[in-house]
Image (cartoon, helix red, strand yellow):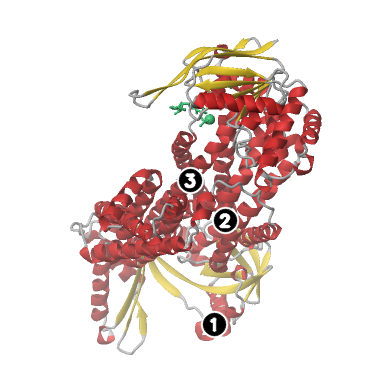
Amino acid sequence: MEILNVNDIRKTYTSRFGAQQVQALKGVTFSVEKGEYVAIMGESGSGKTTLLNILAALDKPTGGKVILDGMELSGIKESELAVFRRNNLGFVFQEFNLLDTFSLKDNILLPLVLGGEMKLAEMTGRLNEIASRLGISEILNKYPYEVSGGQKQRAAVARALITDPKLILADEPTGALDSRSSSDLLQMFSQINRNGQTILMVTHSVDAASHAGRVLFIRDGVVFHQIYRGDCSNEQLYRKISDTLTLLRTGGDKQ
Amino acid sequence: MKTGYAAKIAFNNIRKNYRFYIPHVLTGTGLQACFYIMLTLSMDKRLSQVKGGSVLPFFMTVGAAVMALLSVMLIFYTNSFLMKQRKREFGLYNVLGMEKRHIGRILFFETLYSAAASIILGLLLGVLFYKLCSLFICRLFQTDIVLGFYFIKANTLIPAAMSFIVLYFLTYIFNRISISRMKPVELLKSGASGEKEPRTKWIMLIAGIISLGAGYYQSLSIKDPLSALTWFFIAVFLVIIGTYFLFTAGSIFVLKALKKNSRFYYHAERMTAVSGLIYRMKQNAVGLASIAILATGVLIMISSTVSLYSGMQGTLDNTYAQHMYITADYVDENGETVLIPAEDMEGMIRNVSDKYSCKVLAVEEQEYFDAVYVMNGCDFELVSDQSASTDLSGLCDIYFITADMYEDLTGTRIALEDNEIAICRISSSIGHTKTPDKAVTIGGRGFIVKEHLVYFPISAGMGNVVTCYGAVLPNNEIMDAVFADQQIAYGKDASHYYHRTAVTFEDIETVSKNGDDIQESLYRNIADYALEHNARNGECSTRVDSVWEAKENILGMYGALLFLGILLGLVCIFATVLIIYYKQISEGYEDRERFQIMKKIGMSDAETRKTIRTQSLFIFFLPLIVAGIHTLFAFPILNRMMQLMMLSSTGLYIICSVITYIVFAIIYLLIYRATSKTYYKIVRL
Ligand SMILES: Nc1ncnc2c1ncn2[C@@H]1O[C@H](COP(=O)(O)OP(=O)(O)OP(=O)(O)O)[C@@H](O)[C@H]1O
Ligand SMILES: [Mg+2]
């Protein structure tokens, strides 16, 4: 079943006085099946974050359509967007984006509390379940400044998962982590993906991308190429990705 | 680095940081202007020549001193704020390879520019508003405008400017030192690192409660006006400490308790509001406590000075039952002191009044004496060592007249047996025990209270802080006996009989205008009269106590107080504005990131606004409510001090306080609304 359909998305940034225009996305088209784990790669400035922001309805495209689980994003009213995001999407950011005024526990609970429909007992039930899965049960009462980067990122993942979202969007989630924490996180992503969670992850890291089921390459604002895992192991996928990247860099014109 | 380059960077920095610099410069400007005005007023000779203006230099000197203190505090406050915001920028310069002395040089120019702008603008404003202030003072003193107030006075312009130059130089030195101590790496990181959740400071919490409680208790328990004055300052001190402590520790305590209560806490709006508030209170407790204290200051200053000023007429009416009292005697050739007979006195008074075409309504001869007793239940006792009791509440002053005199003055006859008396409570200090209603002893003599009078024809003197009674005695013999009792008890401190002629005019307004001339003329007539009656060496003594003279005196004092109250009140409001403004923008910068994160997590703009409003309203109302409570508790002690200052109307004081509070709340609300705009702009919502 198709959960996300991105059709010919364009985004043009106009500078403040309209003098300069940057075409960040020139027509991106792809779709994601339910339960898929997709990585998006591309050079810096190729428009990955822009794409993610549009998928998250944090930004509006200048053209094209995004359909999430049968709903067109542009059709949602401004006032309902927040609720839509809360109910359907989970975010994991490069800089964790935990609120420093909340303990990890409160950070994780925040989306549910904002939703305002769930009983406290059910919320804590979910919290404990996810926390033990991610191995952060012990540190729930600590504050973000008291824990390591890897632990922060796990809390951020827990926050993304707790609403049971249709799609998890991750923007370079391993960017601020050391290799040990990165691989922990990637294992975690693979695991939740195996449990049926759809994940869309932007990354620069070949290692990170090699955990995914499919890798999209973006260049000059369009989807330039994609690789399916097929039956490859992580190592084989890793090699394929590096090859593609070398090709991209040397300016090959594939597809 | 070339000096010119530093000067240019400094200029650009000020432009870039206009949000912080504009209020800094405005503060300096306002303070400089007020300080200049105060200083000039305290030295303006012409102003002290205004009727009743002799007390002005003193009050204005006090005002200038207070202004100087406020200036130092406020300029350092805005400066510290400025520096806190800019330390990161300076850290960056430092990391990028700029030496600290170069940063110092840039800082020097920044200080120079802002100081120059503040001082020049401030003096300009000061000169402009000085004229206005002096006109305002003339209005307050109800005198005609004295022409020729100086517009510019170099002899105060220069010291006023110099003081501020020194002040700014001090801030520069202070900033230099803090820069030389800074570690750039730490500075770059500062702000980015998360903040600890504040702990509940138990000792501070308890100390705050005790201190505030003690301060309030002082105010509620003080009975007598004289000690109110000394205890007032102790109470103020205690309340200030208590306020700071409770804002710092108490708020965190309450918020954390709310947070512990999961059912309350895990709720869409409360969760973000409560946790946000915990951090805000940590950073802003001192600022908020300052607002609460400043607001209380404004409320107390303005309401008390306004009520003193507007209650002046009532005070005068209370103390002056008639308009003018004259006591005149001369020494005859045998060295005997002779009182001028009533008929002659009346003749002279009517004579003089006619000359100024003032109609005399009544001339009365009053004979009375008053003595101080210690009241003990129904006994008024003569206690010769009064200094032994510091507590004024037991003391009272009794004015005695005979039944004949009472009939003369009021036209009503009270028939009294030898052991009977009629008494009247003329005034009372708060907390005074009730008037004995059946029998009394006065200096050991027992009387039956025949009647309680509501009116007593002799008014008690001004500024009498003890309870005053009037007593009508049956006849001269008993009057003399009571008089003799106190003479024996008090010896040379005993009081004596007063004989005075009380005059009531028809139109006191016109009389007051010619008041000085009438008095002058009376003095001359009496001197002539003494000569005609062969006074030895023309020796005579005349004492005139008139309502217009009294009015002039209290007008001077109350007018000066009111002016000070208003000016200092304005400065305090200004300080409040400043604190709120800086609070709002610093919070804006901090909250921006937080709200952006929340947006991504799925908090709608409307929800965010709601959270912000909950937090802001709490923060907004807290100081205002606290100020209201402080004012309420300050009321008893202030009311007692007002008595000392001769204001007898409690009702008027209450009205003034309430009006001041409402006006202040409105101003506060407006300020808040205006600064909120800046906040929203920064948070970009
Ligand atoms: N708010 C904006 N206004 C104008 N141009 C922008 C804006 N945001 C991004 N751009 C431009 O759009 C292009 C794509 O930016 P984007 O942030 O999507 O890149 P990215 O692929 O995420 O890069 P990186 O890997 O470095 O994060 C860039 O050329 C960038 O300069
Ligand atoms: Mg990016």
Compute the Cα span from label 1 to label 3: 64 Å
Foreground disc of the pair 3, 2:
3
Mark 2, other Cα within 10 Å: few <14 / some 14–19 / many ≥20: many
Q: Give the left or right position of residue B134, taking residue A221 as reference.
A: left
Mark 3, other Cα within 10 Å: few <14 / some 14–19 / many ≥20: many
The front one of B186 and A32 is A32
CB under 8 Å between discs 1 and 3? no
Residue that badge 3 annotates: B580
Tell me, yes or no, whether dots 1 and 3 are on the same chain.
Answer: yes
Compute the Cα span from label 3 to label 2: 25 Å
Question: Which residue is at 70% across, 26% downward?
Answer: A116
Q: Give the left or right position of residue B677, taking residue B618 as reference.
A: left
Residue that badge 2 annotates: B634
CB under 8 Å between discs 3 and 2? no
Residue B292 image offset from top left, x and y in percent: 54, 51
Res. B106 visible in picture: yes
Query: Is A155 above or below relative to B211?
Result: above
Amino acid identity at mark 3 = Ile
Residue that badge 1 annotates: B487
Asked which quadrant contains residue A90, the reply is: top right
The front one of B252 and B54 is B252
